[in-house]
Image (spheres, helix red, strand yellow):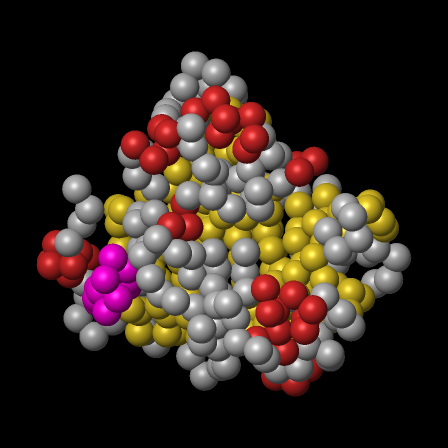
Amino acid sequence: MPQTIAELNSKFAIRDHITFTEDEPGLPKMRIATAASDATLYLYGAHLTQWTPRGGNPVLYLSPKSPLTAGKPIRGGIPVLFPWFGPRWNASEYDAAHGTTSPMHGFARTTVWTVDRVHLDPTGEVEVTLSLPEDEQAKAFGFPDFHATLEFRIGKELHMTLSVTNRSKEAVPFEEGFHTYFAIGNIHAVRVLGLRGSTYIDKRDNLTRKVQRETELAFSRDVDQLHVNTSEPLILQDPANHRAIHILKTGSHSTVVWNPWTVLTPNFPDLAEDSWEHFACVEVVNAADDRITLEPGATHGMAMAISVTSL
């Protein structure tokens, strides 16, 4: 049975710092306010929608038109994409055999996760561990014997680690991603560093494979690129907010960069007309060439660390 708000507050709430509410039906969330940061973490999708280091500007963008309705994904923040990224790679074969319809980006982002642990450090850093229920939905989509946990460390920096253990007797393939929407001041001035020399699949050009020649990736049109075999640190320069956002990743070998611009925004009813001007997605991922195949009894971890410095 899902944890109730009363149970969550009784077991995990910390006066003046951590509380659980359910302002929208079916979307329980955790509010965090400490000396280090303010944050909002929905248990629905294990979805962090707000993170603002104390004294700084919001780091994450949440669409003002996101429906915040059970059964629909939240648009913005950090969606957790699992156990596949984008369309399921074998959807036609699997769904035909099992009578299912595999949802875009997997089922983790529309599932209410279980709270396993909450800890507040004297420095104001909050540690939270959530686990993905091993329920009938997971079984229906072919993942009956796995265990997935997501650990957050939320403070002046943000750390997230998704760990997946294969409890079955067969190797299990899966994809995963932290689909982070970074709040930015001026998309025309934003630059992404750390991808030079990488090969990417250009989803806006018939999946053509190209090479990132420039040191800085700039935005001058709609962008949807999956950079394969990339593990280097990344920097998102946000001059309008006088800051650089640093992204370190481990256990991730793909990076996605996305912005819908004016071209694709009308296709997303949960984005405002001008949303594209206010965010840039730089995503820590394992997908396509970098899909994970997990052997029986093995555990794979993918981690992301985000910090902010003055530019």
Tell me, yes or no, if residue 246 can be seen here: no
Quadrant occupied by the C terminus: bottom right
Residue 16 visible in the picture: yes
Q: Nearer the viewer, residue 243 or 64?
A: 64
Q: Is residue 209 left or right of residue 167?
A: right
Q: Quadrant of residue 89?
A: top right
User: What segment carries the magenta color?
Assistant: 18-30
In this view, the residue in front, 270 or 188, is: 270
Residue 38 in percent (x, y) is at 37, 74
| Left or right: 42 as drawn, with respect to 299 | left
Q: Which sits in the foreground, 189 or 35?
A: 189
Q: Is residue 253 above or below residue 204?
A: above
Which residue is found at the position 54% from the left and 56% from the top?
Answer: 179
Q: Is residue 293 magenta?
A: no
Quarter of the image where one finds residue 152: bottom left
- Identity of the residue drawn at 85% across and 49% down: 210
Q: Is residue 14 left or right of residue 246?
A: left
Where in the figure is residue 69, as x and y percent of width and height? 33, 62
- Residue in the picture at 66% in, 51% down: 255
Residue at image point 66% right, 61% down: 258
User: How far across and how far down the image is residue 44, in percent?
Assistant: 33, 55
Looking at the picture, how far across and down is residue 153, in whole percent? 41, 58
